[in-house]
Image: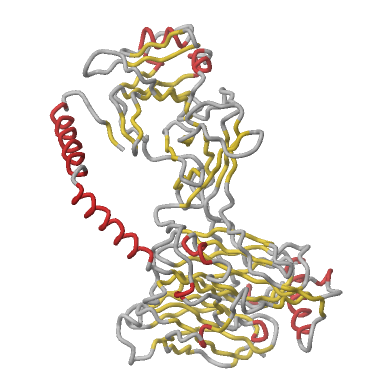
């Protein structure tokens, strides 16, 4: 985004004009057009060869209603096995035996690594459920081409039946990644084998000395649970690459895609609108626009963070006979499945009843492993105006109070005319280079929100206005030229005194879920160790962000519970060389 002209900057404007004319002349040459199209085709083809493969590690493979599922995600390049930064957002879903989503969340990926948690409803039915994870890029090959993992969920208050899911190979090919020809890194878990109650367990993870230094740098997640419910390893379902479809969904590499449609109130797409405008209310203005694509959609790229923002969307041409619809970000392509009513088998009853008892005790004593959500900055804070430093800034407190906004513009804002015309109020801005009015209307905003009905501006009480910011030179953003910008900023900065028109949509939206930390108890002092609250954790320890250095070493520690039995330390991850990490070690508490 840039200003096309500026005072005292005519030389740069002339240079820009010559560059644009030269490019236009070049594109008229058939040979050069062919070369350009060839390069574009080759670039697109190469881009299409990149394939993402997500692997998921959960803290356990069995849960009870009301618990939290903790998971870690590794987004890898299918050809190299290394973590890939191609996508910033992962889509994680929990689907039930009836092939309907129960939970859907988006999480942030940083350099291919992400983690999160979701809560199981208290009303969920007992049965086998599927966790699946994918990126926007992978949506083209759903439902087959994404990671899936089957977990068991038990509801003690709805335990009459246990619904099992029968998955056909045509609809979802689930198999262990160890049997899929994947390369695995050899790692060792070093820890003692027997512990007492509330005793510290110190653990070392070590890659083998035969591994090269680059391979021994690893990203891992660790869970410690009763052995009967420990994670059984990666599961993945996908068709071979040769059978996959062409890519139509792009990488979310710069942010999350927010996609919308404009429909007429009578039904069907509205054909009048070529552009959709987005603004973010606040004292620092934000502005974007999206053009309609061949399928009638408008797509904005918004920040892939956990801050909830309020976006205000308006069509380029005001139209009260239209409505905006947000396209679902989750894929509707669900794996086909068949379920049947069954009962718990063998030791399943004992395992689930133990998990349920522990969970109920923790609820009674108010014990939770989930920390408070990590605080995000306030919602609509932007660091800079989209138009940069304004050419004019009129602070109303520096002048005497004027009765209305028409007087304010007439007396205080040079080069701008606010007047009533044949079709209502209008704003005219003079071009500072020519001294004449632009034929095209400027962009008018109040607190960063686009204003089409200027009677709203005229009726605004000047006492509520803090300042007026003006850009009089043409401003280029993408392919859109704005012939001047006027932003009226109120003292509250929240657009609260303005009524939005019917054709505008106010959308509170959060791109990804906020992160939470797993909290486990510590018994470092005798008073805590002698505490009377029972320690009956179903997951003793969860760390989604364990890393090693080039020495291949990593350490962590946790404390044992009050429940005797066998427990398993499970480590999953990806090495620097692109090899999968999978290791376990059991120990006894007695």
Residue 349 shown left or right of residue 203 in the figure = right
Going 34% across and 39% down the picture, which residue do you hit? Answer: 478
Q: Position of residue 157 (x, y in %)?
A: 84, 69
Quarter assignment of residue 251:
bottom left
Q: Which residue is drawn at 73% across and 65% down?
A: 66
Residue 198 in view, yes or no: no
Q: Which colour scheme is used?
A: secondary structure
Number of marks present in the image shown = 0
Quadrant in which the N terminus appears: top left
Residue at 39% across / 53% down in the picture? Answer: 254
Q: Residue at x 49, y 43 (%)?
A: 298
Image position of 565 (left or right of 511): right
x and y percent of residue 276 in the render? 48, 36
In percent of width and height, residue 3 lies at 27, 31
Relative to 49, say whether 316 is above or below. Answer: above
Q: Position of residue 26 (x, y in %)?
A: 17, 44
Q: In this view, does 510 lie above or below 477?
A: below
For the residue pair 313 and 44, the one nearer the viewer reads as 44
């Amino acid at each position: 985004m840039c200003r096309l002209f500026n005072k005292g900057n005519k030389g740069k404007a002339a240079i820009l004009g010559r560059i644009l004319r030269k490019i236009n002349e070049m594109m008229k040459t058939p040979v050069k057009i062919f070369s350009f199209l060839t390069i574009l085709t080759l670039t697109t083809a190469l881009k299409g060869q990149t394939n993402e493969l997500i692997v998921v590690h959960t803290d356990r493979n069995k849960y009870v209603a009301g618990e939290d599922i903790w998971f870690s995600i590794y987004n890898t390049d299918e050809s190299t096995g290394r973590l890939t930064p191609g996508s910033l957002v992962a889509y994680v879903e929990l689907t039930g035996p009836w092939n309907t989503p129960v939970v859907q969340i988006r999480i942030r990926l940083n350099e291919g690594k992400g983690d999160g948690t979701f809560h199981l409803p208290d009303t969920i039915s007992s049965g086998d459920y599927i966790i699946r994870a994918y990126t926007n890029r992978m949506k083209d090959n759903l439902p087959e081409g994404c990671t899936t993992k089957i977990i068991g969920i038990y509801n003690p208050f709805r335990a009459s039946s246990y619904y099992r899911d029968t998955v056909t190979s045509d609809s979802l090919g689930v198999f262990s990644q160890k049997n899929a020809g994947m390369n695995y890194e050899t790692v060792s878990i070093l820890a003692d084998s027997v512990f007492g109650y509330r005793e510290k367990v110190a653990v070392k993870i070590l890659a083998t000395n035969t591994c090269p230094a680059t391979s021994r740098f690893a990203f891992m997640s660790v869970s410690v649970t009763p052995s009967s419910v420990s994670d059984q390893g990666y599961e993945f379902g996908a068709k071979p690459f040769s059978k996959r479809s062409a890519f139509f969904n792009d990488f979310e590499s710069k942010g999350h895609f927010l996609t919308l449609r404009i429909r007429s109130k009578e039904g069907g797409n509205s054909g009048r609108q070529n552009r959709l405008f987005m603004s973010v209310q606040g004292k620092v203005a934000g502005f974007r626009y999206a053009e309609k694509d061949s399928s009638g959609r408008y797509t904005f790229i918004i920040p892939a963070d956990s801050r909830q923002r309020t976006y205000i969307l308006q069509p380029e041409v005001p139209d009260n006979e239209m409505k905006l619809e947000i396209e679902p970000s989750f894929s509707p392509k669900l794996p086909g499945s068949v379920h049947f009513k069954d009962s718990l088998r063998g030791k399943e009853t004992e395992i689930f009843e133990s998990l349920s008892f522990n969970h109920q005790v923790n609820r009674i004593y108010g014990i939770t492993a989930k920390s408070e959500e990590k605080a995000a900055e306030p919602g609509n804070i932007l660091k800079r105006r989209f138009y940069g430093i304004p050419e004019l800034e009129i602070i109303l407190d520096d002048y005497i109070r004027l009765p209305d906004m028409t007087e304010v513009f007439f007396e205080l804002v040079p080069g701008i005319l606010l007047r009533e015309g044949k079709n209502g109020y209008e704003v005219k801005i003079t071009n500072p280079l020519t001294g004449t009015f632009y034929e095209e209307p400027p962009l008018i905003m109040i607190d960063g929100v686009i204003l089409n009905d200027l009677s709203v501006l005229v009726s605004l009480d000047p006492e509520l206005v803090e300042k007026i910011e003006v850009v009089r030179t043409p401003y280029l953003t993408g392919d859109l030229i704005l012939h001047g910008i006027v932003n009226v900023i109120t003292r509250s900065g929240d657009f609260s005194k303005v009524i939005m028109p019917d054709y505008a949509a106010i959308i509170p939206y959060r791109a990804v879920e906020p992160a939470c930390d797993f909290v486990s108890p510590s018994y470092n002092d005798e008073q805590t160790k002698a505490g009377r609250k029972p320690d009956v954790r179903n997951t003793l320890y969860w760390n989604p962000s364990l890393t090693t250095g080039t020495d291949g070493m990593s350490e962590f520690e946790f404390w044992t519970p009050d429940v005797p039995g066998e427990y398993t330390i499970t480590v999953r991850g990806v090495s620097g060389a692109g090899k999968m990490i999978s290791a376990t070690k059991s120990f006894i508490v007695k």
